[in-house]
Image (spheres, rainbow, N blue to C red):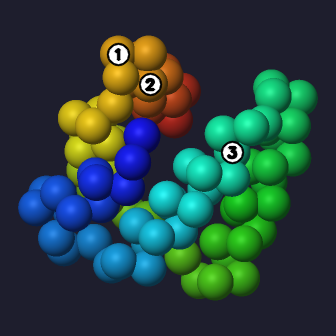
Amino acid sequence: MTNEWMNDPALADIDRTKLDFLQALVFESRSLNKEQMLPFLMAVAKRGQTEHISFSNEEIEVIAATIKNYSSAEEAAAIDKMMRMRKK
């Protein structure tokens, strides 16, 4: 996935710093295996706190829907799974 999704008009009201943060995470996590993912996500949460980056539920929904529009079928399925897990 490229960073084209970041320029989608649906994201116009979301701070660019937040979108840059997400894009960096996408690139950093690409080479991780399942065992490395949990420590990575914990570090990401810590970095988000340090940088005062948080997302409202509405922002998360809009971002996920937008990213899906630019994703492969496999990536979209992973996003759907992640969003279902988030709601539980």
Residue 34 in view: yes
Q: How far separated are the C-alphas under marks 1 and 2?
A: 6 Å
Residue 25 coordinates in the image, percent (x, y): 61, 56
* Secondary structure category for the residue under label 1: helix
As helix, strand or loop, the secondary structure at mark 3 comes to: helix
Q: Position of residue 78 (x, y in %)?
A: 49, 22
According to the picture, the residue beneath numbered tag 3 turns out to be 29
Badge 1 vs badge 2, beta-carbon distance below 8 Å: yes
Mark 1, residue position:
73
Q: Against 13, is 74 above or below?
A: above
Residue 1, quarter of the rendered image: top left
Mark sitting on residue 37: none
2 or 3: tag closer to the N-terminus: 3
Label 3 crowd (10 A; few <14 / some 14-19 / many >=20)? few
Q: Quadrant of residue 36?
A: top right
Front one among 62 and 27? 27
